[in-house]
Amino acid sequence: MPSNETTERIDRQLLQEVVERAGPLTADGEVADYIPALAEVARDRLALAVAPLAGRPESADPVLAVGAGDEAFSIQSISKIFTLTLAMQRNVGARLWDRVGREPSGDPFNSIVLLEREEGVPRNPFINAGAILVADVLAGAGDDPIGALVSLVSELAGADIAVDERVAASEAATGYRNRSLAYLMRSFGNLVGEVEHVLDIYFQQCSLSMTARQLARATRYLANDGIDPSTGRAVLDPLDARRINALMLMAGTYDAAGAFAYEIGIPCKSGVGGGIVGIVPDQVSICAWSPALDQTGNSLAGRAMLASLVSRSGLSVF
Ligand code: GLU
């Protein structure tokens, strides 16, 4: 069970200080514009949300959120956590790991270089090629992957979560590189489904729209041995939850994963919408959001907020 000593030190005032100090950083970095719909988001937004496993006794809402914590944004690659969860739930783990690796890539999230050399087998499920492959596995498992995903995240977030169809259409219209990755994997016979259908699943999963508060709440099962503290339901078995955290630490923040582990010291998963989820096993899950990205594609102010929160509250797993 969670130790409450550390989480008790995280109060609204601490979160507000962290957010305020990050304010000037929103002038730096670039909002992603290779997906045109993402470029429309105001760069000055900042949010920080922390969800302790034990909830907050003084409140019915288990999440403490400050800044723009109730403003929805595009979760983008953070969705890769949830689709991997669905694949593990469907017990396709064994088949999955023949087709996707579990190693860091050391390359940008959308890189195609290694994929040619490694015969269409992506390095891990958190780079784009790997997540497209997971979408292929889910499509092959026979059910409606987006329906299953929406119902999983809605249950975990305690709210109705939906795909932003405008963002999905924008991604589909400009997703040339993702198409290249998918067709290359198809040419090697690793991706087996109908390519455009698989891509459609991938574009839709990335276009889920959620708030920092909802994301912090929805990822608590990863800090809690796979059990959603809101419902007591086992979303994953403890081993699979631990494995997702290991993959996040190693590959959740593109080719900056090493620097994240070194500077922050908790498993994180970021998305080009500017969100970053951080997991502190047995204690809390965290979501930071600010749209402008650094050169590695991670939220610049989000990364600074996580580093500051973790160091001030002693949450590093190391
Ligand atoms: N939909 C984005 C893409 O495929 C996701 C990238 C990300 O958030 O890392 O390019």
Image (cartoon, helix red, strand yellow):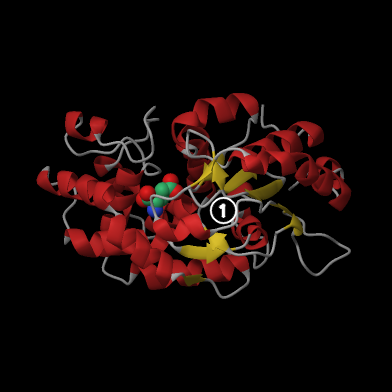
| Residue 216 position within the rendered picture, expressed as x and y whole percent measured from the top left | 65, 55
Q: Which sits in the foreground, 95 or 59?
A: 59
Depth check: 161 or 97 in front?
A: 161
Q: Residue furthest bottom?
A: 160
Q: Is 41 left, or right, of 308 in this rendering?
A: left
Q: Quadrant of residue 254?
A: top left
How many C-alpha atoms fall within 10 Å of the one at disc 1: few (<14), some, or many (≥20)? Answer: many
Residue 138: in sight, yes or no? no
Number of numbered callouts drawn: 1
Q: Give the residue at x 58% y 28%.
A: 261
Q: Write down the quadrant of residue 129 in the picture.
A: top left
Between 43 and 307, the one lying in front of the other is 43
Residue topped by disc 1: 226
Residue type at tag 1: Gly
Left or right for 178, reference 306: left
Report the residue at 38% width, 39% height from top.
Answer: 109
Q: Secondary structure at mark 1?
A: loop
Q: Is mark 1 within 8 Å of ligand 1?
A: no
Query: Measured along the vertical axis of the image, is residue 5 above or below residue 172?
Result: above
Residue 125, image x, y percentages: 37, 44
Of the 4 image quadrants, the one containing the C terminus is top right
Q: Is residue 265 visible?
A: yes
- Residue drawn at x 37%, y 35% is 102
Residue 183 drawn at (x, y percent): 16, 49
Determine whether 133 is above or below 197 in the image.
above
At horizontal 30% and vertical 71% (from top left) the residue drawn is: 143
